[in-house]
Each structure stands twice: as structure tokens, then as C-alpha cells.
């Protein structure tokens, strides 16, 4: 691998019968006639978390080259510059091949300096158009041609990159083309390459919003299920793709778990994350158009434990963390919560107190009772047993 090349590329979804173009930057220790072999593996997700699905290898030989002044780059334009983190940008090269000899070989590389930031600028496609001269045609994702006519040909070569990181300084642009001319392979004249405008460090315009629950401000009365929404907002002028989203589910005051087959992105079902409790991670191409918000929605199961359950989330573009700020060096994850209120304690239902009904003769009876009481008082010393009985 070349310097700064990690050898991992996110291919994305490939339709049945389709072909994907995946470039890598390689380096050679010197010219050799023996084959240099490289192994390639395909994975259905991040290679650090799943096993290899299939594998192959390829080999090539290397040769020394010399400079040819007629093989030249006229101009290079990078757009947009600076690129947007997580988005694609182009490097458009206008040049001329010079006289192509031998077996009519023309090949090209977007960057040939050993310190090219392949870890930050991932090549994802190319388009070569011969505009005038001895050759014509358009070649997509093909940087090695043979059998060309020998006459010098003007061309426009457009490389498409994905900005998947940031850099501390601007990166020098140094595209090189090769032709098989005479007894040697000849490379582009380098006399004017040092004056080309560099690629500036990518800027971040993507943030996560706060997670919200389908319960709103309400609490569950007992254990149950809540739907969680995580918004992803792209405030930039170009579409952005996140490679993964990780949500940390709480284990206190009880363990919250992911509900299988509940994940949706922008209203469409997506594969389950890896994991069901703790940190669950979706490895998926979360593409958000320019100036747009897209939502990741999923369900969680809440235990029957009273309290507030706190969730947090981050996104990733390659190894760069995306959170609630555009600063890629801080730690500001998205947060959200779900609460469970205590189960109500059953209470007794009060009964009504009967209301006494007045007897029509109550006044007269009251007078008789008063007289009786007076009479009893007068004889209380003489008849204690009777009083006791009357009481």
C-alpha cells in the first residue's frame, strides 16, 4: 500500500449484475520484472466486524520511466475547494498525451506524490475523454488504455473523490500520465505541477439533532416500547454520506434493548444494527441531500423500572465523528431520553355517611327524655343500679 492508504473502501450497494470500481493507491520499491501480488477481500460490512465473503488477488510488474515534455498537464481544477466532508468533489485535468508509440499505451494516476492523502481523499471514479488529435472516445473508470493511435491527443480527465477526513494543511495536487513512447515509458512533464492549486482541508456541514421519543414528554406507566428518531442534517451544498451510526442504549436504571426489524431511514426499512444492547451500530450508507434533514428511526424496549433512561448517538464518516456540532475534534453526541413513572398504588373508595331522618315527634320525645334525665338525676344516689341499667 502507498503511504496513507488504509486499503479499505466503502463500495456501497451493488445491484445484481452490476460492477463497482474500487481504486487503491499502491507503491513499488523499485523496477522489477517479477510480479508484485496483492490480495483483495470483499465484506458485507465493516471488515472489523464481519467475516470475509470472497477474495481474489492480482499482480503486476513495475518499470522506470522518464519525463516527456510533450506529455503535459495544462490545467487542474478542484471543485468544490474546499470539499465538503462526506461529499464528493472532482479534480478535472486538461492536457495532451504527446506522441504515443510502442503498443499505444496511455495510463494515468490522480496523484503520484508519496504523501498524497489517500486516507482523506478516496478516489471513487474517473472519466477520460479524448477531445482532439489521433484518438477519440470516452472511457469511464478505466485508467489504463492500450492499442491507441500514435498521434498526440488532447484530453479531459475528471477524477471523482470522496472527502472522508480532514487535513491539518492543504494537499499538493500532482497528477501524472504515462505513455509508451519509443524505447521508454514516459511520464508527464513535472515543470508546471508545483504551481497547481492544492486541495484544501474539507469542511464539515453535517450535524446530528437531539433524539426524540414517540412518547413526547409523557412517561411509560410500565415497561413497553418507544420509537426513537435521530435526525441527521446536512447544511452544505452537496449530498453527504455517513458510513455508520452508533447509538448507546442505557443499562441504568434498567437495560434498554433494540427491537429487531424496526430500523428505518428516510421512511424505508434498513438492515438491523450490530448488537441489541449497549452500543448498537448501523453500518449503512446514510446519504443526506444538500440542505436537508433525514431521520433514522428505530424502536427500543423499556424495562419495568421507574426512572429516566438516557440515550446517546454519534455518526461516522470513515473515522471522523459526526455529532451535534460541526467541530470534528470535540465530543458532543446527540442525546435523548425515555422515562417510566411509578405504578400507581391502589386506594380505597370512600363510602357515604348516612343522614339521620328527623322523627316528627322528636321535640316531644326530647322533652320527655329531658324530664326523664332530670328525674334520674334526682334519684341517682338512691338507685345506682337502675341508673347503670338506664345508661
Image (cartoon, grey):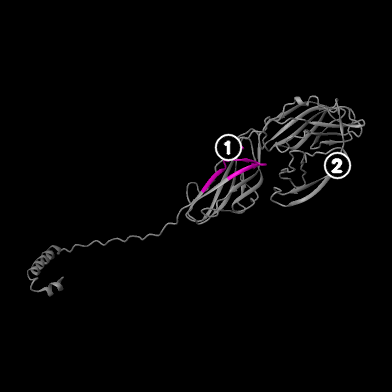
The residues colored magenta run: 313-337
Seen as rendered, the residue at the extreme bottom is 385
Q: Secondary structure at mark 1?
A: loop
> Who's the residue at 13% across and 75% down the image?
385
Image position of 390 with respect to 95: above or below? below
Q: Quadrant of residue 6?
A: top right
The answer to whether 108 appears left or right of 289 in the picture is: right
Residue 3 point in image, percent of width and height: 75, 38
Q: Residue 60, which numbered label?
A: 2
Where is residue 81? Give x, y as percent.
68, 29
Residue sitting nearer the eye, 178 or 289: 178
Q: Label 1, label 2: how many angstroms apart (C-alpha)?
A: 45 Å
Q: Position of residue 285 (x, y in %)?
A: 67, 43
Residue sitting at x 55%, y 51%: 250
Q: Which residue does the numbered mark 1 point to in the structure image?
A: 325
Q: Nearer the viewer, residue 30 or 388?
A: 30
Q: Residues within 10 Å of mark 1 (few under 14, many from 20)?
A: some
Amino acid at each position: 500500500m502507498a503511504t496513507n492508504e488504509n486499503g479499505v473502501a466503502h463500495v456501497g450497494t451493488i445491484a445484481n449484475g452490476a460492477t463497482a470500481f474500487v481504486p487503491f493507491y499502491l507503491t513499488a520499491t523499485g523496477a522489477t520484472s517479477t510480479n508484485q501480488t496483492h490480495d483483495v477481500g470483499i465484506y458485507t460490512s465493516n471488515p472489523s466486524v464481519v467475516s470475509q465473503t470472497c477474495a481474489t488477488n492480482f499482480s503486476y510488474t513495475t518499470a522506470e520511466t522518464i519525463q516527456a515534455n510533450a506529455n503535459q498537464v495544462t490545467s487542474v481544477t478542484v471543485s468544490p475547494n474546499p470539499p465538503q466532508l462526506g461529499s464528493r468533489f472532482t479534480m478535472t485535468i486538461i492536457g495532451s498525451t504527446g506522441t504515443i508509440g510502442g503498443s499505444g499505451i496511455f495510463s494515468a494516476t490522480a496523484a503520484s506524490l508519496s504523501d498524497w492523502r489517500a486516507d482523506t481523499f478516496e478516489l471513487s471514479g474517473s472519466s477520460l475523454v479524448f477531445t482532439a488529435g489521433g484518438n477519440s472516445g470516452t472511457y469511464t473508470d478505466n485508467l489504463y488504455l492500450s492499442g491507441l493511435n500514435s498521434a498526440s491527443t488532447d484530453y479531459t480527465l475528471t477524477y471523482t473523490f470522496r472527502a472522508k477526513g480532514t487535513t491539518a494543511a492543504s494537499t499538493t495536487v500532482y497528477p501524472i500520465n504515462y505513455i509508451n513512447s519509443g524505447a521508454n515509458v514516459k511520464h508527464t512533464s513535472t515543470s508546471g505541477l508545483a504551481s497547481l492549486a492544492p486541495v484544501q482541508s474539507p469542511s464539515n456541514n453535517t450535524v446530528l439533532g437531539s433524539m426524540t421519543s414517540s412518547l413526547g414528554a409523557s412517561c411509560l406507566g410500565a415497561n413497553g416500547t418507544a420509537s426513537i428518531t435521530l435526525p441527521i442534517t446536512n447544511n452544505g451544498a452537496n449530498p453527504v454520506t455517513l458510513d455508520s451510526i452508533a447509538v448507546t442504549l442505557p443499562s441504568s436504571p434498567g437495560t434498554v434493548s433494540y427491537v429487531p426489524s424496526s430500523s428505518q431511514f428516510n421512511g424505508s426499512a434498513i438492515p438491523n444494527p450490530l448488537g441489541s444492547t449497549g452500543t448498537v451500530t448501523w453500518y449503512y450508507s446514510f446519504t443526506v441531500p444538500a440542505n436537508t434533514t433525514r431521520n433514522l428511526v428505530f424502536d427500543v424496549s423499556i424495562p419495568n423500572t421507574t426512572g429516566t433512561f438516557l440515550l446517546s448517538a454519534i455518526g461516522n464518516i470513515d473515522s471522523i465523528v459526526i455529532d451535534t456540532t460541526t467541530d470534528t475534534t470535540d465530543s458532543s453526541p446527540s442525546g435523548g431520553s425515555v422515562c417510566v413513572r411509578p405504578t400507581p398504588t391502589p386506594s380505597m373508595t370512600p363510602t357515604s355517611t348516612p343522614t339521620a331522618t328527623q322523627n316528627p315527634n322528636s321535640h316531644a320525645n326530647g322533652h320527655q327524655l329531658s324530664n326523664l334525665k332530670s328525674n334520674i338525676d334526682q334519684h341517682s344516689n338512691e338507685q345506682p343500679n337502675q341508673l347503670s341499667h338506664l345508661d
